[in-house]
């Protein structure tokens, strides 16, 4: 029985879903639909796939997300592989690394390549087409899935299907086309042979490596060099940073699929299978509104929300009460440090706000107020001139690095659990309702020796309070 390896590409930043999605905590890590994050939902989508032997999933991601992704897999009781990209180089190099990793022990599984940030509502329909694609991919074809369009969408690329490829609805790929204008999109819809390009692929690992060798030998050479310089770091697979940084950036479509569609005889057959399964790339707030359940007036609300005389709105509250009266076709998103109000027809322009935040050096474009770390998380509760207040939660058995600050002192107040504190050459326990002081320039470490989360309030004071004022001496997480 041929083996199927799910490969989840988790490299996007999702800037059009700001302020929920941010550069260092992007949309695939968020539970936008249901309790699972989009990443977790992507992995669950192939659970219970009948008649196919599944390997544990492989997630290809940026180093920034490694600990959050590891935690999300742990919560699913999945021991998958996490392959780290030192820098982003688009999907073709990411898939090349995944194929090299898949064949490292002599195997040649079929790879099911899935973006981590898409939504598919009908899992049964998706699994049906995966089983169809599995048979074709096992025989050496490069399979992609085209979404059956229901509107003249200008935000997607298209795949034109050609002659039938055997039975089961598969067709040869006639061509890939770029995002069209409205009139062209309407013509594609009327034609009936065009499908939305989903970014989903199935092919054997060896088939991809042969194809990328034919089309982009420079990408393959850089990825092989990076792989040869790589190492295993606990649950993470690392590749050589300098070698991978030399890799050209290119997408799967541009690097290989367009040449397959053009009929290059040196390449394998390209096949597209139609998919009608409630797919969305959730590329902006209007597309999220489309896939979420609505009330009788077309409204979607999440969190502490009150609506009166509103229609076709999307309102999300991250904590505070949000009340809307008499609005229509509007998106309102509240988070602890930012509020977005945008007309549904302008949601693609949210990216311009993120670009402005970057130019101004503001943190709201990169980080949430609540920041996840491998040991737990912290929330920036308040800040002012020469002080900052954080709520810190440390997981049972976890420890922060042994560190020192040049510009700030810290006061720690334990509100739940017990803290093991290292300060200079001494080590001691701090219990609930007790506090301690870490002077500027003193080596220190915070640990949770207990079996419940350690919750504490940290008050920082000093001339500079940035996160880069950390000198680490020891760190179990390799930072």
Image (spheres, grey):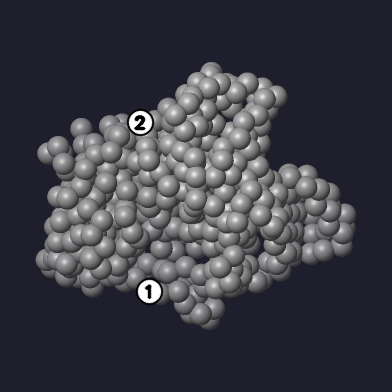
Q: Residue drawn at (33%, 59%), measured in percent from left and top? A: 87
Which numbered disc, 1 or 2, marks the residue closer to the eye? 2
Residue at image mark 2: 79
- Tell me if mark 2 has few (under 14), some (14-19) or many (20+) residues whose alpha carbon lies within 10 angstroms of its own: few
Q: Is residue 188 left or right of residue 267?
A: right
Disc 1 versus disc 2: distance between alpha carbons? 38 Å
Indicate the position of residue 28 as horizontal and vertical percent values. 49, 50
Check the image and report above or below for 8 versus 283.
Answer: above
Residue 177 image label: 1
Q: Is residue 122 visible?
A: no
Indicate the position of residue 336 as horizontal and vertical percent values. 70, 51
**In the foreground, 291 or 325:** 325
**In the foreground, 191 or 144:** 144
Q: Residue drawn at (47%, 68%), measured in percent from left and top? A: 156
Indicate the position of residue 162 as horizontal and vertical percent values. 31, 67
Q: Which picture quadrant has residue 417?
A: top right
Indicate the position of residue 247 as horizontal and vertical percent values. 23, 64
Cβ atoms under marks 1 and 2 closer than 8 Å: no
- Tell me if mark 1 has few (under 14), some (14-19) or many (20+) residues whose alpha carbon lies within 10 angstroms of its own: some
**In the foreground, 63 or 50:** 63
């Amino acid at each position: 029985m041929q083996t199927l390896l799910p490969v989840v590409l988790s490299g996007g930043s999702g800037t059009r879903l700001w302020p929920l999605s941010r550069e260092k905590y992007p949309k695939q890590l968020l539970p936008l639909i249901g309790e699972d994050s989009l990443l977790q939902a992507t992995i669950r989508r192939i659970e219970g796939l009948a008649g196919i032997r599944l390997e544990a999933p492989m997630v290809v991601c940026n180093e920034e997300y490694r600990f959050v992704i590891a935690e999300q897999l742990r919560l699913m009781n999945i021991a998958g592989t996490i392959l780290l990209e030192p820098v982003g180089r688009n999907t073709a190099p990411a898939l090349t690394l995944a194929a090299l990793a898949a064949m490292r022990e002599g195997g040649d599984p079929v790879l099911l390549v899935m973006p981590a940030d898409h939504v598919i509502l009908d899992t049964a329909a998706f699994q049906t087409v995966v089983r169809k694609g599995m048979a074709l991919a096992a025989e050496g074809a490069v399979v992609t899935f085209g979404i059956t369009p229901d509107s003249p969408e200008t935000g997607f690329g298209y795949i034109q299907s050609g002659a039938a490829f055997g039975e089961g609805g598969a067709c040869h790929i006639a061509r890939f086309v770029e995002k069209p204008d409205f009139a062209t999109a309407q013509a594609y819809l009327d034609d009936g042979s065009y499908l939305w390009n989903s970014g989903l692929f199935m092919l054997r690992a060896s088939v991809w490596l042969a194809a990328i060798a034919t089309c982009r030998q420079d990408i393959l050479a850089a990825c092989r060099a990076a792989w040869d310089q790589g190492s295993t770091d606990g649950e993470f697979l690392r590749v050589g940073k300098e070698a991978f940084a030399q890799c050209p950036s290119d997408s799967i479509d541009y690097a290989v699929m367009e040449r397959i569609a053009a009929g290059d005889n040196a390449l394998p057959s390209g096949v597209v299978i139609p998919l009608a399964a409630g797919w969305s790339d959730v590329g902006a707030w209007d597309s999220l509104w489309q896939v979420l359940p609505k009330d009788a007036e077309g409204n979607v609300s999440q969190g502490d929300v009150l609506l009166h005389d509103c229609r076709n709105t999307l309102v999300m509250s991250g904590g505070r009460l949000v009340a809307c009266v008499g609005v229509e076709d509007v998106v309102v998103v509240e988070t602890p440090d930012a509020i977005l109000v945008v007309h549904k027809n302008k949601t693609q322009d949210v990216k311009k706000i993120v670009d402005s935040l970057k130019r101004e050096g503001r943190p709201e474009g990169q980080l949430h107020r609540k920041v996840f770390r491998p040991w737990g998380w912290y929330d920036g509760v308040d800040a002012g001139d020469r002080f900052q207040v954080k709520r810190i939660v440390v997981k049972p058995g976890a420890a922060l690095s042994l560190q020192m600050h040049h510009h700030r002192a810290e006061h720690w107040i334990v509100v739940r659990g017990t803290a093991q504190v290292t300060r200079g050459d001494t080590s001691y326990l701090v219990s609930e309702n007790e506090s301690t002081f870490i002077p500027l320039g003193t080596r220190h470490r915070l640990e949770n020796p207990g079996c419940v989360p350690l919750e504490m309030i940290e008050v920082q004071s000093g001339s500079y309070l940035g996160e880069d004022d950390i000198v680490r001496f020891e760190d179990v997480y390799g930072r």
